[in-house]
Amino acid sequence: MQEYRPNNQLDALDIRILNELTENARIAYSQLAKNLNVSNSLVHQRIRKLEDSGVLADAQFKLTPDKLGYETCAFTQIIIGEPKFLKSIIHELEKIPEIVECVNIVGRYAIMVKIFAVNNTHLRDIVYERILSIKGVTETNTLVTFETNFTRSLKLNY
């Protein structure tokens, strides 16, 4: 199988830092420096560079939806009437707190969103009353998940 590598300006130390941070975002910079056998100030400089370049985004705590009472997870695909509505639809979707991810896709559907709902009735209300009421949305297709088998950050292997 062919090996694919993205075109970027990361060196070996950057990659090692990113891989360590994706394993443990709470690691102290001093411990990270020790693990990588480099100075603490170098770690600070490199992380600042990665943040400034946009490679490293804001660190966040990850909530566990089912532990918070959100029993239903679904992906809803959205057909829009005309391309001119795309930006305004996305803006309206951002206002729905149960939507945690929104992507523009190719094919019959233009947008796909990931939704966490308390139950199926709540999901139905989000789709029928919130999403389908947005001007420019003409149709949806919702896929309910049974479980999430895994999620992960991108691992850098080059």
Image (cartoon, rainbow, N blue to C red):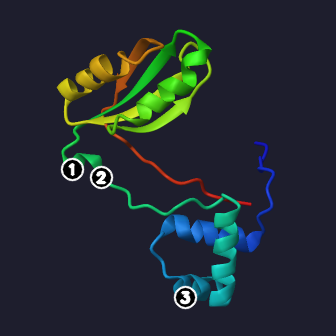
Residue sitting at x 77%, y 48% = 3
Residue sitting at x 38%, y 57% = 62
In the foreground, 36 or 54 = 54
Residue 68 has which mark?
Answer: 1
In the picture, measured across the screen, residue 73 lies left or right of residue 42, that is left
Determine whether the residue tagged by mark 3 lies in a helix, strand or loop.
helix
Determine whether the residue tagged by mark 1 lies in a helix, strand or loop.
helix
Residue 1 has which mark?
Answer: none
Which residue type does callout 2 highlight? Thr
Residue 34 vertical position relative to residue 19 in the rendered view, above or below: below
Q: Are dots 2 and 1 in contact, CB under 8 Å? A: yes
Determine whether the residue tagged by mark 2 lies in a helix, strand or loop.
loop
Question: Tag 1: Cα neighbours inside 10 Å, few (<14), some, or many (≥20)?
Answer: few
Residue 55 image point, x, y percent: 66, 58
Residue 45 vertical position relative to residue 143 in the rendered view, above or below: below
In the foreground, 55 or 87 = 87
Residue 148 image point, x, y percent: 36, 41
Q: Which residue is mark 2?
A: 64
Which residue type does callout 3 highlight? Ser
- Observer able to see residue 37: no
Q: Which residue is mark 3?
A: 30
Residue sitting at x 28%, y 19% = 129
Residue 83 image point, x, y percent: 61, 15
Question: Tag 2: Cα neighbours inside 10 Å, few (<14), some, or many (≥20)?
Answer: few
